[in-house]
Image (tube, rainbow, N blue to C red):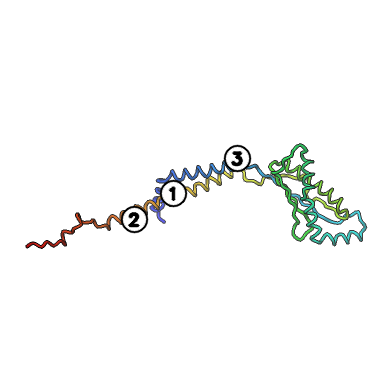
Amino acid sequence: MTWNDVNAIVLRILRRWWIIVSVLVIVVGASFWGLSDSLDRYETTTLMVVGPNTEMEASEVLRVADLVGRNVVMATYADVMSSPKVVAAGMVATDPTRSDWADYEVRVVQEPDSNVLRMIVEGSDATLTAELTSNVQAEGQATLAELFPIYSITPLSAGEPQAYLISLPWARTIGIAVGIGLGLGVLLALWLDSLLAFRRSAYASEGRSGVAAPVGGVDPQTAVFNRR
């Protein structure tokens, strides 16, 4: 590609600048509209290990340790930790006056091939998300200790839970929208310019190859007059 080709492409884009501006405004406006209705999302991750209760006798500890290795125990612990009973109690402990927790979510999954559970809490407020994590963890430990006293569950995370922003910041989202809008606008401008150029060339070629019809429907070069 030569500089002449580059200049030709730039001139084609500049001729259709209004298309680029229109697409850019639409894409950025849609991004603003989507961000105005969405809330920031924060997340905490807590690791917990399940093992035998060390207060039991040594022989019982070995037997329970063998049972913990079975997936049914870990699956049960994950279900109990994320159950409505435990989560609802944690929400009440976090804020007794709040009734709507629709934008908060608690998930507990088992780490592959281990006795470790991963609890993930998401929410729209960093402080509430961290507090909810601590309260759900405490409620889950109390419930599991009551249901399965032969097991113990111990947090592996040090210190208080910290919530981190996982949704895209406004500036980055708008920057991505501007890039997408400019890209789509340039492609649309080039496509429209090519389409109009093709139509002009097609009409011009038809005009050059067309033959005018003779006046009156008679060709004077082939007309034969019989005069007697």
Q: Earlier in the sequence, mark 2 or mark 1?
A: 1
- The residue sitting at 18% across, 58% down in the picture is 218
Residue 9, numbered label: none
Q: Secondary structure at mark 1?
A: helix
Residue 171 image position (x, y, % from top left): 58, 42
Residue 132 quadrant: top right
Percent position of residue 15, x then y: 40, 46
- Does residue 167 appear to the left or right of 222 in the view shown? right
Q: Position of residue 207 (x, y in %)?
A: 28, 55
Judge by depth and name the residue closer to the eye, 82 or 183: 82
Q: Which residue, as the protein is rendered here, is positioned at the far right?
A: 57
Eye-nearest disc, 3 or 1: 3
Kind of residue sitting beneath label 3:
Ser
Q: Residues within 10 Å of mark 1 (few under 14, many from 20)?
A: many
Label annotation for residue 36: 3
Residue kind at label 2, given as amino acid type = Ala
Nearer to me, 99 or 195: 99
Q: Which residue is denoted by mark 1 in the rendering?
A: 189
User: In the rendered view of the protein, which quadrant contains the C terminus?
Assistant: bottom left
Q: Which mark is residue 202?
A: 2
Which callout, 3 or 2, points at the residue further toward the start of the chain? 3
Which residue is painted at 80% across and 56% down in the image? 76
Q: Residue at x 48, y 45 (%)?
A: 23
Looking at the rendered image, the disc whose residue lies closer to the viewer, 2 or 1, is 2
Q: Residue 19's x, y, as percent? A: 45, 45
